[in-house]
Amino acid sequence: MTSLDAVFWGLLLAAFVTGGIVGALALRARQRRRLVTLAPKMTMLQARYEMLAGASRRPCAVMLGDSLTAGVPWSEMTSCPAVANYGFNGDTSAGVLYRLNEIIRLRPRVVFLMIGANDILKGVPPAETTANVRAIVEKLQAEGIAVIVHPVLPFVEVGDRLAELNRAIILALAETQAKIVPLPIDIPDLRDGLHLAPSGAAKWHDTIKPILEARCSGHHAPDAATSA
């Protein structure tokens, strides 16, 4: 074997070894990424629910609803860390009713509920949405939790369905102790025809600020699991 052949085979061996090391490192990196990947059947909504379900501190107020609620930074806006945001993107009245026991476990003093926009978009009959909303309110009140209900906000291309649903909800809640608080928010306060622009979030906050201050005054956020 000539010296040139020896150099050639030496370089080939070095390339082989280097390639093996790089391949092994890449495989290990992929394995590490799998450790933090959500299970195939776990949606982002479920992942967030699992995170919130682990909360051990009792909030004074819970903001409950869909993406309209989820998109508002309630703790920062109210300067109160005891305001919990339980708005989930894409949620419906049936979804809120399904996860209501987790809210009850937290034992908040008051729940602010606005739900129904996705029911309209998904073609849920108003009677079904109304029944769900009433069941939510009655279940919370049975646990001694005050409930503030906001009629569904106007959004583009919804027609008469919105007004019909809001009328039905208000009528269905007439015999409960829920307080109906309309929000002074209209289409110009929406950034995409559906979700809140900063002006809409500010109007919502300003509307409920007196209620929050009254309900959360002196709140010390004990552990939810040990509170009465």
Image (tube, rainbow, N blue to C red):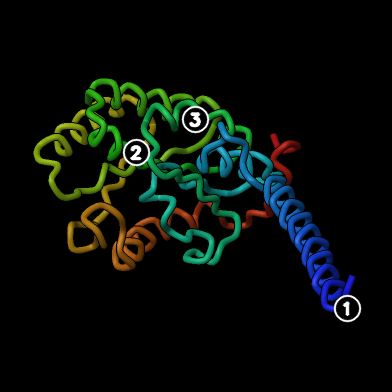
Camera-side residue of 129 and 9: 9
Q: Which residue is mark 1?
A: 3
Name the spot of residue 132 as percent of width and height, x first. Answer: 36, 24
CA gap between label 1 and label 3 equals 86 Å
Name the spot of residue 115 as percent of width and height, x first. Answer: 34, 38
Which part of the image, by quadrant, shows the C terminus?
A: top right
Q: Secondary structure at mark 2?
A: loop
Q: Which residue is mark 3?
A: 140
Name the spot of residue 81 as percent of width and height, x first. Answer: 60, 59
Give the tally of numbered discs.
3
Name the spot of residue 173 as percent of width and height, x first. Answer: 31, 28
CA gap between label 3 and label 2 equals 15 Å
State which tag comes first along the sequence, 3 or 2. Answer: 2
From the viewer's perspective, is residue 4 above or below residue 178?
A: below
Q: Which residue is mark 2?
A: 115
State which tag comes first along the sequence, 1 or 3. Answer: 1
Camera-side residue of 189 and 106: 189
227 on left or right of 75: right
Dot in front, 1 or 3: 1
Q: In the rendered structure, which amino acid carries the disc numbered 1?
A: Ser
